[in-house]
Image (cartoon, helix red, strand yellow):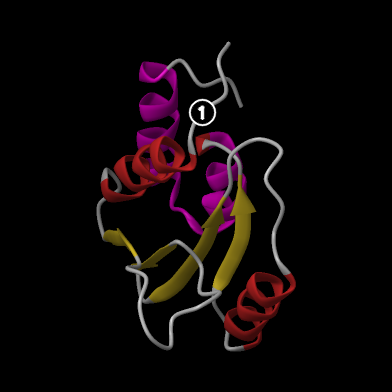
Amino acid sequence: MPKRLEKSIVKGILEMLNSIPRCVAFKRQAGPGRRGQPDITGCYWGMRIEIEAKALGGTVSKLQKEKLLFWKKAGAITGVAYNECDAWDIIRYILTPDDKEICRKFLQKKKQIC
């Protein structure tokens, strides 16, 4: 299987998150003052989600780790995802049973085995 680009991973994670009712997520744009911020930001039932996406073999920088910790200390659900299954592992503990089933169906449709 060819290595996926980070852009493709971000797109897949956003599709999964935005398929969940009561969840909204988007890719954070780069710019002044945003260095090190996680790639994906979102909210599910009032709970903040911050996910740093990486291509397989990619490494998280010290600044990115610091930003994830910053958000975690503020109560956000945070993590690093190398694919949609990793994003599932980050958020599954906060999902309702119905929303978990929506994610499972999404991952099956994408042929992701988690």
Q: Is 59 displayed left or right of 52 in the figure?
A: right
Name the spot of residue 64 as percent of width and height, x first: 64, 71
Q: Is 86 displayed left or right of 103 in the figure?
A: right
Q: Residue furthest front?
A: 32
Q: Residue at x 30, y 60 (%)?
A: 26
- Of residues 75 and 28, the one nearer the viewer is 28
Crowding at dot 1, Cα within 10 Å, few <14 / some 14-19 / many 20+, comes out as few
Q: Count the marks: how many?
A: 1
Picture quadrant of residue 80? bottom right
Picture quadrant of residue 55? top right
Question: Which part of the image, by quadrant, shows the N terminus?
Answer: top right
Name the spot of residue 5 as percent of width and height, x first: 48, 34
Picture quadrant of residue 58? top right
Name the spot of residue 107 as percent of width and height, x first: 44, 26
Name the spot of residue 63 as percent of width and height, x first: 67, 77
- Of residues 51 and 99, the one nearer the viewer is 51
Instruction: Reply yes or no: does residue 81 show up in magenta.
Output: no
Say if 34 sits above or below 56 in the image.
below
The residue segment tinted magenta is: 85-110
Q: Secondary structure at mark 1?
A: loop
Q: Residue at x 36, y 76 (%)?
A: 46
The amino acid marked with disc number 1 is Arg
Instruction: Reply yes or no: does residue 101 show up in magenta.
Output: yes
Disc 1 designates what residue?
Answer: 4
Question: Which part of the image, by quadrant, shows the C terminus?
Answer: top right
Q: Main secondary structure of the magenta part?
A: helix
Q: Residue at x 50, y 37 (%)?
A: 84
Q: Residue at x 63, y 60 (%)?
A: 79
